[in-house]
Amino acid sequence: MINYSRNIIGNYDAFVRTRLELLENQMKQYNWEQDQIAHMKNYIARFGHGSAKLARQAQSKEKTLAKMVAGGLTEKVLGDKTVSFHFPSCGSIPPPVIMVQNVSFRYSDSTPWIYKNLDFGIDLDTRLALVGPNGAGKSTLLKLIYGDLIPTTGMIRRNTHLKMARYHQHLHELLDLDLSPLDYMMKTFPDVKEKEDMRKIIGRYGLSGKQQVCPMRQLSDGQRCRVVFAWLAWQVPHMLLLDEPTNHLDMETIDALAEAIAAFEGGMMLVSHDFRLINQVAEEIWVCEKETVTKWQGDIISYKEHLRSKVLKEKEKAAKF
């Protein structure tokens, strides 16, 4: 039987080792180049106006220096972390924060029930991941809790002071792509008066320099997602509803997101196919299946093992026929 936990950790450890080696080599190359540049600049400054022979040598070093610069210098390694997500302090709300009471839902009278008679509560200490087969209603449940969908029967009660932020994969399509991240955030959060303060905020999400001031249509999908996370975070929500948040994010950014969630004061519900992220942030696993939600008595690794065993049994059964 495959040990998924060992595979995840082993693959990630190999990634970390390779990345550290590349960073170390990059830093060595950067230091060597800086030493050469400092030496040449010093020589040019000392002997550029000296004797004819020394002046020619200084001019030669000046040309070499110009070629190095034109060819592109190695970037300095700015530590191992360039992305550090942050969710500001949201304060506390006394429970119950969200009450799901006898909720059933289907999209129309002619479509099947997705949920029947759901009954549970969610507080600010909730950290759970929703799992289950495609089409079982994981995203639908987040939409119901957020208020984008209305229960067919039953009721969802939310604390009147509750602020929620829902991330979904189409959220970056709502960005004004003609604006820069800096202008967009300044427009959205006018309480932040100084551009330098907003630059620091955006910088925490891995956007720096020209990325902050160029139109967002010039950014990659991953960079736009970082703008979205900055936008979500600075709404200061009490509850995060995250639907496939790792799409378009690299491993470093996913780890930054996991660390930010771990430090977050509020509650979280997560839908994700990235069970490494689930393993990092979820304290409970809820299975969406057969028109209901059931708490899984174990972690995400044991759930994956359960799915694998189920698939193997189905293959064996099919092979007999």
Image (cartoon, grey):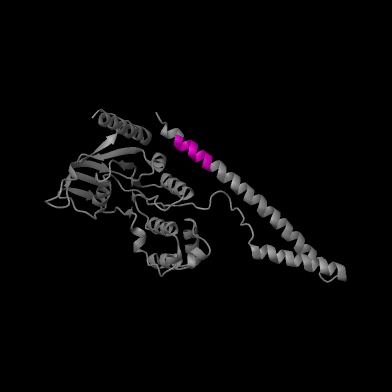
Report the front residue among 56 and 165: 56
| Residue 319: quadrant of the picture | top left
Is residue 90 shown to the viewer in this render?
yes
Residue drawn 69% across and 65% down?
Answer: 67
Q: Residue at x 63, y 57 (%)?
A: 74
Quarter of image, res 312? top left
Could you tell me if residue 191 is visible in this image? no
Q: Is residue 171 left or right of residue 223?
A: left
> What residue is drawn where x is 64% and y is 60%?
73
Q: Which residues are magenta?
A: 7-15
**Residue 316: x and y, percent?**
29, 29
Q: Position of residue 174 (x, y in %)?
A: 34, 63
User: Left of 173 or right of it: where is 206?
Assistant: right
Within the magenta stretch, is there residue 95?
no
Between residue 193 and residue 202, name the one nearer to us: 202
**Depth order, front residue of 129/189:** 129
